[in-house]
Image (cartoon, rainbow, N blue to C red):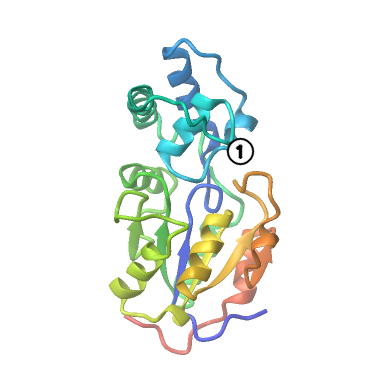
Amino acid sequence: MNFKNKQVVIFDLDGTLVDSAPDLANAINHMLVELGRVPFNQDTIHGWVGNGAQVLTERALSGNQVIDPNLSPELTADALAIFLSAYRANVCVDSQLYAGVKTTMATLAKRGYRLAIVTNKPVEFVAPILKALGLNGVFDIVLGGDSLALKKPDPLPLSHVCQALGVTVEECVMVGDSKNDIVAAKAAGMESVGLTYGYNYGEDIAIYQPELVLSDFSELLNALPHLAVKKS
């Protein structure tokens, strides 16, 4: 399909543009070892990513996708601080862009689209990752999970992007790998693209009925034609 009348493309970060699981897993395992707990393999931690740092920490402490309701707030706070410190020190060591991301971004910009990031990752980590991977300066707006009062799957971040860039919901499309991205888009009344790779807790992204499902990031170019006029 071709999306019509779009001006802005909004991207998730982890699992969509960047495979950040190796660095997240290293920081989580550092936290667990510091607390005298057994670390997990990267594939297991991969399945816990996508809802922000605190939820990832709570899942690691629970050893499960489902968070233990008996976790103490004090333990969670201590663990989160250890994790964030470890991740801050090694935020982009083994993380890398997925295939086709950089060239696709450059082509979309040349076609006249404005680009944005809406991620649930704490915003302090986003700029260092973008810089390390050669994507700094590409995006008109970047929102992290702590930039606003609510994060995905709430539609607030997507609505905020529309307001900040002076566009309608209909002029935007959300691109992500997680149900949080698709649910947020639907709640905002925005069309979306679901990616089959990334971090979606083992679920098929098609279950959440995005308008388009892709397995190759560069295929996005087939759905977003040249704009007749580039908006400033």
Q: Residue at x 36, y 74 (%)?
A: 162
Q: Is residue 95 left or right of residue 149?
A: right
Picture coordinates of residue 73, whole percent (x, y) = 35, 28
Q: Locate residue 116: give its quadrant.
A: bottom left
Badge 1: residue crowd in 10 Å (few <14, some 14–19, many ≥20): some
Q: Residue at x 57, y 54 (%)?
A: 178
Q: Is residue 153 above or below residue 1?
A: above
Picture coordinates of residue 69, whole percent (x, y) = 48, 31
Determine if residue 69 is in view: yes
Q: Is residue 72 left or right of residue 29?
A: left
Picture coordinates of residue 72, whole percent (x, y) = 39, 24
Which is more toward the observer, 175 or 101? 175
Q: Is residue 210 above or below residue 55?
A: below
Which is more toward the observer, 183 or 193? 183
- Callout 1: helix, strand or loop? loop
Q: Amino acid at mark 1?
A: Gly
Residue projecting furthest to the bottom? 228
Query: Which residue, given by chain and number where applicable, does mark 1 sit on?
Result: 47
Q: In which quadrant will I find the C terminus?
A: bottom left
